[in-house]
Image (cartoon, coloured by chain):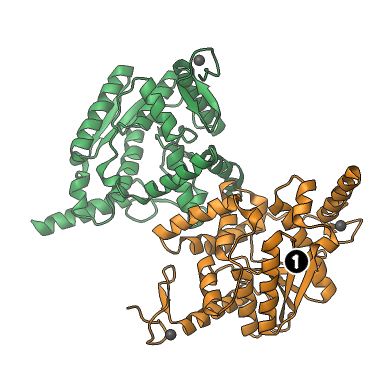
Chain colours: A orange, B green
Amino acid sequence: MRKCYKCDKKAQVYLPQHRLAFCKDHYLEWFDNRVEKTIKEFKMFDKNSKILVAVSGGKDSLSLWNALAKLGYNVDGFYINLGIGDYSQKSKELALKFAKKIGKTLNIVELKDEIATIPEMKTYDNRPACSICGTIKRYFMNKKAKELGYNIIATGHNLDDEAAVLFSNTLNWSIEYLKRQYPVLKEENGFIRKVKPLCKISEKESAIYAILSGIEYIEEECPYSVGATSIDYKLFLSQLEEKSPGTKLRFYSEFLRKMYPILQSYEEKVELGRCEICGEPSMNRICSYCSLKMKLQAKKEKTV
Amino acid sequence: MRKCYKCDKKAQVYLPQHRLAFCKDHYLEWFDNRVEKTIKEFKMFDKNSKILVAVSGGKDSLSLWNALAKLGYNVDGFYINLGIGDYSQKSKELALKFAKKIGKTLNIVELKDEIATIPEMKTYDNRPACSICGTIKRYFMNKKAKELGYNIIATGHNLDDEAAVLFSNTLNWSIEYLKRQYPVLKEENGFIRKVKPLCKISEKESAIYAILSGIEYIEEECPYSVGATSIDYKLFLSQLEEKSPGTKLRFYSEFLRKMYPILQSYEEKVELGRCEICGEPSMNRICSYCSLKMKLQAKKEKTV
Ligand SMILES: [Zn+2]
Ligand SMILES: [Zn+2]
Ligand SMILES: [Zn+2]
Ligand SMILES: [Zn+2]
C-alpha cells in the first residue's frame, strides 16, 4: 500500500511523472500550491488583480476557478452560451451551480442575442466550427472583461492542451506560432492580459482535483470538437508519456525555459490597429468578428 | 492499375508522401536525382571531391555508394570490422562483394588489430555498446580518411534516422544538439567534412532502391542496437506518417529551413584542441578514443 508523501494516511492519488503519492487532502493542497507556483513563476497576476475565469463548465475551468478562489484571489467567472443544444444547456447549469456554491459572480453572454448561435453560424460559414468558436470566444472575453472592469482573463488550458499545440506547431516548425506559445499574453493594443495558470497541470490531475473537490462538471466534449486534429496529437503524446512518465511536462517546460527566449529575439512587432466598425484591436481594417457578422448578415439577406 | 508518372508502364513503386508512382527504371532515376538534388541543395561536394562512403553492409550505405557512383562521383568505401560475430562477418562479405561489383576500392579497418572488438570492449566499459561504437566509428572514419587522402566522408543516414534524432532532441529541447543537426558538418579543427546525402530519402525508399538495383545487403540490425530508444521514436514518427503522409519529411526539412538558421545566431564557437596522445581533434586534453584505449589497457593489466 502506497502512503501519502506528506502524512501517514493511505495514498489516494499517485502521480507517476512527479513520483508522488498523496491522500485526498494533501493532493488538493499540492494542486493549489502548484497553481500558485505557476502564477508566481510567470508573474501572471497578484492579489490586487481583478480576474475573470473563462468558464466552459468542464473540469479544467471549474478546477481553476476553485483553486484561484481558495488561494484568495479576486476572481469571477465568465460564461458564453454558444447555443450548442443540450451541451450548452447542461454546461451553463453546472457553471451557475458552481458559482452559487463558491459565492462568486458568473457573468454570462448569450451568443444568440449578440450575433447567432454556433450551429446557426455554421450554416453560413464553412470554416470548422472550432475556428468560428475561437474567434467568438476571444472577441467577447476581451470586450466584456474590459466593459466589466476586469484586468486579467484566466483560461483553463492544461498541460495536455499546451503540449499538443506545441507539438503541432513543432511538427511544422511554425515559428510565428511558437514565438507566441507562452502561458502569459501581455496586455497591449487593447487586449487584456491573458493567462493559463494550469499550463503545468495535466488533464488527469485536473480531473482528479475536480472529483476530489466534489465539483460537478460536464464530462462530454463539445460535439463539434470530435475529430479535431489536436486530439490525435494528445493521443500520441500520451503514448510517449506512458512509456516515459514526465515526457509531456519536460517537452513543454523545457520549451519555455530554453527555446522560447531564443525565439523572442526574432520577434518582429506587428503593429495592431483598431477595427473600423467596433473599435476592438485588429490586424486588418475590419476585425475577424465583425467580418464574421457581416458575412452572416449578407447571407441572411440573400436567403430572405 | 497505377501507371508510372514518367512513362506508360505499370508502376512498381508508389510514394504516398510525394504522391508519385514509378516503374522500376524511373524509380531508380528519381532516387538518383533526389540524391543529386540534396547534394546540390546543401553544397555537400562536387565532381572534384574525393569521397569516402562509410559502409556498414546495410541497405542505406550500399544504396548511397551505388547512387554516388552512378552519378559519376569519385567515391570509395570504408568499412570498419567491429568484430560482432556473424553480423560483422556477413556484413563485411557483402560490402566486399558490392565493391567488386561496382569496381571500387573498399578500405577496411580491423578493429581487433587497432584496439579490440566491440564485444571485448563491452566487457571493460559499461557505457551502451552503441555509444562505444559511435566513438570508434567517428574516430577511425576521420583519421583514416585523412591518411588515405579523402576530403569528404559520406554516411548513409536516412530521413528516418535524422527525423528520429531531431524528434528526440526536440522533446528535450537540447539546443546544443539541435544547433548541430545539419546534413553537412564542415571541415574544421582537424575534422574532415561529413555529409548525409540520403537525409531526404526515407528508410523504405532506400530499401526499395537497394532491392530494385539488385544490391545484396545485410537485413539484420546490429544485435547491440536492439532496444535503443531511437527505435521507439521511429515507431512514433511512423504512426504520424501513416495518418498524414509527408509529416516526417516536413518535420525534418522545415526544421532545416526555418529553425536551423535561427539557432545558428546563438552559436558559441567551442575552441577545439588536439589530443596529447594521438594528435586528433579533441575537446579535452585526451580524446575520447584514447581515453577508451587507456581504460581498456588499465583493466586488462588488472585482470592479468
Ligand atoms: Zn496526506
Ligand atoms: Zn470589429
Ligand atoms: Zn516509367
Ligand atoms: Zn587521442
Q: Give the vertical position of A183 relative to B260 (above or below).
A: below
Q: Amino acid at mark 1?
A: Ile
Residue at the disc numbered 1: A80
Quarter location, residue A19: bottom left
Q: Residue at x 61, y 45 (%)?
A: B258
Q: Position of residue A121 (x, y in %)?
A: 78, 52
Q: Is residue A81 left or right of residue A223?
A: right
Q: Give the vertical position of A170 relative to A215 (above or below).
A: above
SS for callout 1: strand
Q: Residue at x 22, y 36 (%)?
A: B88
Taking the view exactly as shown, the residue that stands out farthest to the left is B304
* Mark 1 belongs to chain: A
Q: Is residue B129 visible?
A: yes
Q: Give the vertical position of A229 relative to A245 (above or below).
A: above
Q: Is residue B98 left or right of residue A206?
A: left
Q: Quadrant of the image for the C terminus of chain B?
A: bottom left
B228, B288: nearer the viewer: B228
Crowd rating for badge 1 (residues with CA inside 10 Å; few <14, some 14–19, many 20+): some
Q: Is residue B74 visible?
A: no
Q: Is residue B44 left or right of residue B210?
A: right
A155, B33: nearer the viewer: A155
Q: Residue at x 35, y 45 (%)?
A: B280
Mark 1 CB in 8 Å range of ligand 2? Answer: no
Q: Position of residue B256 (x, y in %)?
A: 56, 42
The picture quadrant for ligand 1 comes to bottom left
B89, A80: nearer the viewer: A80
Q: Residue at x 51, y 57 (%)?
A: B173
Quarter location, residue A91: bottom right
Q: Position of residue B54 (x, y in %)?
A: 35, 33
Q: Give the vertical position of A84 relative to A128 (above or below).
A: below
